[in-house]
């Protein structure tokens, strides 16, 4: 398997300088293996991990190459790598499972109980979740992504009537990445509109938003966190000044309350958490 087939993550140290190696092995994109594996690893904050994704392990040759790479890492580091797998094909699972790492297969762990309960064998078809097995669902997600891009940062207001949700907030509070995540992951049509200093000084809801009040949802953030995010982007000038951040956040939250717009504090939340909370609060499906 070439270097182009693998994606390395953060480096760290588990006693040693570079950390415990973790491999995510999949016959498709590796997204599921990464998501489930990282969820487990997040519970071990004292350990730092070096992550490597091996996607598209969909043949005996690639399975052997994956095993060889894991074995080489075990030999080099003297420590058994953790191997998270979502391989569908039992033959490929057996090949990778014979590696010198700690093999943890999500698919094999859960498929047999489901088979027993449903009284049927599974399809043995890879790529059902993140592939093109459901063209209509995939097309819907791509349409939602195009909508999010076309209506980003206050653009395309004429299309707001098609929006499932319209996110409001000051600059750098997470509107754009949340809109794109809602679109790509859930097929939700999410627009976003910036509450600039000029808008906030007026103290009234912009005219372009008034007809779409039912779709509005506000985001807010701690001024200190906002100042850090802005400083990383534009360190000079008043954009990242804590005084400006405090004033904008205060005015935005005042606007939300006066206009009865539900809002969410994103300070300590990931994009995934923000998006899921919005889905729940808005009752979106």
Image (cartoon, helix red, strand yellow):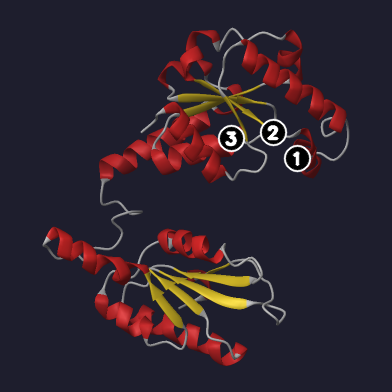
**Residue 208 rendering spot, x and y as whole percentages:** 56, 10
Q: Is residue 111 above or below residue 101?
A: above
- Asked if residue 49 lies left or right of residue 203, the reply is left
Picture quadrant of residue 266: top right
What is the crowding at mark 2: few (fewer than 14 residues within 10 Å), some, or many (at least 20)? Answer: many
Picture quadrant of residue 77: bottom right
Residue where numbered disc 2 is placed: 221
**Residue 123 rendering spot, x and y as whole percentages:** 18, 63
**Residue 28: numbered disc:** none
Between the C-alphas of marks 1 and 2, the distance is 7 Å
Residue where numbered disc 1 is placed: 225
Q: Give the quadrant of the C terminus.
A: top left
**Residue 168 rendering spot, x and y as whole percentages:** 60, 24
Q: Do the numbered discs 1 and 2 sit on residues whose CB atoms are within 8 Å?
A: yes
Q: Is residue 21 above or below residue 136?
A: below
Picture quadrant of residue 262: top right
What is the crowding at mark 1: few (fewer than 14 residues within 10 Å), some, or many (at least 20)? Answer: some
Q: Do the numbered discs 3 and 1 sit on residues whose CB atoms are within 8 Å?
A: no
Closest to the observer, 169 or 148: 169
Residue where numbered disc 3 is placed: 176
Is residue 122 visible in the rendered image? The answer is no
Disc 2 versus disc 3: nearer the observer? 2
Q: Do the numbered discs 2 and 3 sit on residues whose CB atoms are within 8 Å?
A: no
- Asked if residue 113 lies left or right of residue 119, the reply is right
What is the crowding at mark 3: few (fewer than 14 residues within 10 Å), some, or many (at least 20)? Answer: many
Q: Earlier in the sequence, mark 2 or mark 3?
A: 3
Q: Is residue 187 above or below residue 23?
A: above
């Amino acid at each position: 398997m070439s270097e182009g087939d693998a994606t390395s993550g953060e480096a760290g140290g588990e006693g040693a300088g570079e950390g415990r190696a973790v491999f995510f092995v999949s016959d498709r994109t590796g997204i599921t293996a990464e998501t489930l594996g990282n969820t487990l690893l997040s519970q071990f904050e004292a350990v730092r991990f070096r992550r490597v994704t091996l996607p598209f392990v969909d043949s005996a040759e690639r399975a052997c190459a994956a095993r060889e790479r894991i074995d080489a890492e075990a030999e080099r580091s003297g420590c058994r790598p953790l191997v998270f797998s979502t391989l569908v094909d039992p033959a490929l699972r057996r090949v990778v499972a014979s590696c010198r790492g700690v093999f943890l297969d999500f698919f094999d762990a859960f498929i047999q109980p489901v088979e027993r309960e449903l009284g049927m064998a599974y399809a043995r078809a890879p790529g059902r979740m993140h592939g093109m097995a459901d063209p209509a669902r995939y097309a819907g997600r791509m349409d939602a992504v195009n909508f999010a891009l076309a209506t980003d940062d206050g653009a395309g207001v004429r299309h707001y009537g098609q929006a499932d949700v319209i996110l409001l907030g000051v600059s750098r509070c997470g509107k754009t990445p949340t809109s794109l995540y809602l679109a790509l992951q859930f097929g939700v049509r999410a627009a976003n509109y910036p509450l600039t200093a000029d808008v906030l000084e007026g103290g009234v809801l912009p005219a372009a938003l008034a007809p779409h009040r039912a779709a509005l949802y506000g985001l807010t953030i701690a001024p200190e966190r906002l100042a850090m995010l802005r400083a990383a982007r534009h360190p000079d000038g008043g954009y990242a000044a804590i005084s400006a951040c405090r004033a904008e956040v205060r005015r935005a939250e005042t606007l939300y309350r006066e206009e009865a717009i539900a809002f969410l504090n994103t300070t300590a939340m990931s994009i995934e958490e923000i998006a899921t909370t919005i889905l729940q609060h808005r009752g979106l499906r």
